[in-house]
Image (cartoon, rainbow, N blue to C red):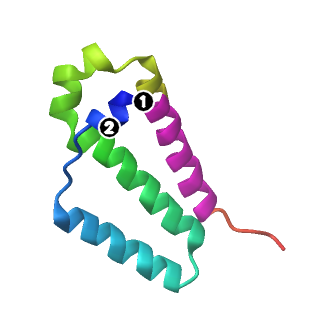
Amino acid sequence: MDFLFEMKFCAPLYQIGLLLVLSTILLFFGKVKFALLVNFVYTLYWAYVFDRAYLLEYGGERADYFSWVYFGFGFIIVVLALFGFFMTSRD
């Protein structure tokens, strides 16, 4: 639990603003699933791409296999969600 209180998170303000604008627009148009997907992709980006230097520098000491498995499953969820968006329903 101490890890949560000691962790530092710095994301650029323009990225947070872009996330807020995208999520708001998608929710206004009733695209709840797509808004959740956008938020999930931003979370993966901030955790694994934006902080890549920190992850590579200190990741061996602090990160275990759980974080990499989480990223793998997250990537699979994104791919399956995009696949589901492009599927047409035959009603």
Q: Residue 1 got which mark?
A: 1
Please, which residue is most extreme toward the top here?
A: 61
Which residue is drawn at the image coordinates 41% and 53% (left, top)? 41
Q: Which residues are magenta?
A: 70-86
- Between 82 and 21, the residue placed more toward the observer is 21
Task: Name the image quarter holding the N terminus.
Answer: top left
Task: Inspect the image, locate mark 2, and give the three-letter code of the amino acid beneath it.
Answer: Phe
Position of residue 67 in the picture relative to residue 17 (left or right)? right
Measuring from the top left, give residue 3's x and y in whole percent. Answer: 34, 29
User: Tag 2, which secondary structure?
Assistant: helix
User: Tag 1, which secondary structure?
Assistant: loop
Which residue is drawn at the image coordinates 43% and 81% (left, top)? 25
Task: Name the image quarter holding the C terminus.
Answer: bottom right
- Count neighbours of disc 1 (C-alpha within 10 A) and say few if under 14, some if 14 to 19, many if 20 or more: few
Measuring from the top left, give residue 7's x and y in whole percent. Answer: 27, 36
Does 75 appear above or below 14? above
Position of residue 85 in the picture relative to residue 91 (left or right)? left
Whether label 1 touches label 2, CB < 8 Å: yes
Which residue is drawn at the image coordinates 59% and 63% (left, top)? 85
- Between 83 and 69, the residue placed more toward the observer is 69
Which residue is drawn at the image coordinates 47% and 23% (left, top)? 66
Measuring from the top left, give residue 24's x and y in whole percent. Answer: 43, 79
Does 59 appear above or below 27? above
- Count neighbours of disc 2 (C-alpha within 10 A) and say few if under 14, some if 14 to 19, many if 20 or more: few
**Pointer 2: what residue?**
5
User: Based on the displayed image, in which of its 4 quarters is residue 15 positioned?
Assistant: bottom left
